[in-house]
Amino acid sequence: MENLAPFLLPGDAPPVAQALYWLGYTVLFVFILSSMFGTGLSVTLRELLAPVRNRRLLTLALVSNFVFVPLLAFVLIALIPMNGQLAGGLLLVSICAGAPSTMKVAQVTGGNVARAVSLAIFMNIGTIILMPIFLPFVLPGTQADTLEVTGYLVLLILIPILLGLFLCSYSESLAGRLRPLVIRISDISVVVIFATIGVVFLSRMGHFVTGASGVTAIVVATLFTLGALGLGFLLGSFAGESREEIAFGAAFRNITAALVVIFAGFTNAMNDVLLMVLMVTFISVLTVSILAGIIYRKRYGHEGPRAWFGA
């Protein structure tokens, strides 16, 4: 991960920027572990297996995340001239499914939170299985071998999810007491990351967007996010009341998994890979947040904040 510093920190970066970066770097691991553990704490084994009984829902989620979204990435790569690193970064996020943020979106939009969490866990498992297989083709210049990447994914994503899942299944009351604390830690971590690495990234945004790679990354990330969201809504129309969960799951890529892969295999010569990943993160968070806010206001605007707490 320390190899990411040259991307965000120029040689003449002031001490404040360096301190912000390293604080954000440390908190990033706290966010990954807490968000994955919190995801596991939010669903019992019985609730996790519910989508298995709904084969249509599970099939649509798998197809949208691991077929249609990667195909969209290939189409954009074919239509829009971009260098190999930007293309690799786009392909990387396209096969990273199961963002824990879908649970937050389900809460805001009035969706089925348990079902959203269950689908996110299944998508994480799919990501962990597929990533080591496709990584050599997605990022042929990476220095990490597939076993190393698998180890990172299992250690930072799968194990915390399973620990939370088994704890919730063993004692829902204990999980219920731990869940608010873990979610609060995750939420605070996000704020700290945006206030540190996010600030450093935005301070260099002018440097990024003035180059050809930066402009291309913004355009591609925007088209990719909107396209994934549209495809998700299209496929979700066959899932009935789960339409929005399918759509937001497709648009909200699992940036956590993408960053874990970058931890294992990133080199200083692959800056545009990270640039694309960060741009997709920024555009997807912005787009999904706006759309979720519109849905929230439409459904609960007349009830105000009481709707959020289920009052």
Image: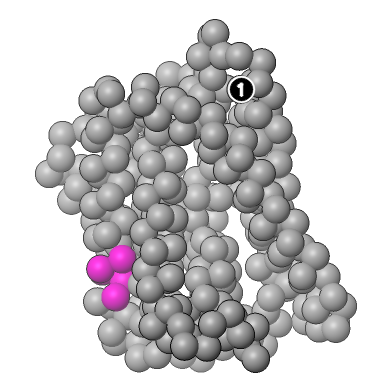
Count of numbered circles on the image: 1
Residue 134 appearing in the image: no
Give the quarter of the figure containing the N terminus.
Answer: top right
- The vertical placement of 168 against 142, above or below, is below
* Callout 1 secondary element: helix
**Residue at image point 66% right, 68% down:** 39
Q: In which quarter of the image is residue 42?
A: bottom right
**Residue at image point 26% right, 69% down:** 231
Which region is colored magenta? Answer: 229-233
Relative to 308, 75 lies left or right: left
Question: Outermost residue, top direction?
Answer: 12
Relative to 30, 63 lies left or right: left
Magenta includes 12?
no
Q: What x and y, as percent, mark residue 107?
A: 56, 77
- The vertical placement of 119 against 173, above or below, is above
Badge 1: few (under 14), some or many (20 or more) residues near its Cα, within 10 Å? Answer: some
- The vertical placement of 17 against 30, above or below, is above
Q: What x and y, as percent, mark residue 166?
A: 77, 74
Give the quarter of the figure containing the C terminus.
Answer: bottom right
**Residue at image point 24% right, 76% down:** 234
Relative to 90, 234 lies left or right: left
Disc 1 designates what residue?
A: 17
Q: What x and y, as percent, mark residue 224?
A: 28, 53
Residue 303 appearing in the image: yes
